[in-house]
Image (cartoon, rainbow, N blue to C red):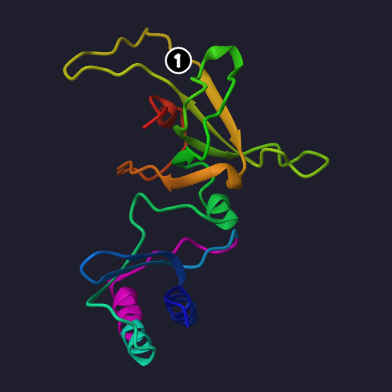
Amino acid sequence: MALKEIVEQTVSGLGFDLVELERSAGGLLRVTIDCPWTPQSAERFVTVEDCETVTRQLQFALEVDAVDYRRLEVSSPGIDRPLRHQQDFERFVGQVIDITLKAPIGAAAEGKVSSLRKKFRGVLERGDAEAAVAPTVPWRIIWRDEPAVKPGVRVSKKRKAAPLQALGFALDELKEARLAPIVNFKGRGHGSADLVGAGSK
């Protein structure tokens, strides 16, 4: 049985989702898990005890299948959680995310965005999901390309905000997508403050 299949079956059998599986140099096997989510379910987070439970069960499963590894690390996704599946994007609508396209965007309207650009940071929204036929751009991100502010320099409250910009995309156009690693002690939101400076990484 393939390594990913062993890990995925073990993790799902314990009631968790496999987010990421990484095999690093030196024999480290890194497994990232998360709690299952549905639109109707309350948000639940992985605990230390959850990681310990999964670690013990994985150690047993890997030993049975004679998988060669030196160290096993099981953890929760963290603030830069990867987004890979349709359900991940549904779960994090309204959050600030980082995306990298497989190919540059090409011609851009009014020249506001470089045609060579592939990396973007913005608030995730649903695209034209209400279209009569299947949506051509099921997702989009919204951002402002605010100029960088030098340390110690005050920003005038009268300064005009940069215009909002939007990019529609389908999941198969993405090379990578993650939650933006933004520390916000008031919780993740998607108010206008989150859009300021939320352009390319």
Q: Position of residue 170 (x, y in %)?
A: 62, 42
Q: How many marks?
A: 1
Q: Which of the 4 image quadrants contains residue 125?
A: top right
Residue farthest to the bottom, as pictured: 64
Q: Where is residue 97? Give x, y as percent.
A: 44, 41
Outermost residue toward the left in this view: 152
Q: Nearer the viewer, residue 13 or 67?
A: 67
Q: Residues within 10 Å of mark 1 (few under 14, many from 20)?
A: some
At which x and y percent is residue 74? 31, 71
Magenta span covers which residues?
40-56
Residue at left offset 47%, top offset 61%: 43
Quarter of the rendering occupied by the C terminus: top left
Residue at 83% over, 40% down: 132
Instruction: Identify the image quadrant of residue 48.
Output: bottom left
Label 1 secondary element: loop
Lateral position of residue 159 relative to residue 154, left or right: right
Left or right of residue 78: residue 10: right
Residue underneath mark 1: 162
Q: Position of residue 172 (x, y in %)?
A: 60, 47
* Residue depicted at 47% across the width and 32% down the height: 118
- Above or below: residue 44 compared with residue 85: below
Q: Which residue type carries mark 1?
A: Ala
| Residue at 46% across, 78% down | 2
Examine the structure image and report whether residue 47 is included in the region drawn in magenta: yes
| Residue 85 placement: quadrant | bottom right
Q: Magenta span has 171?
A: no
Vertical relation: 178 (above or below) 2: above
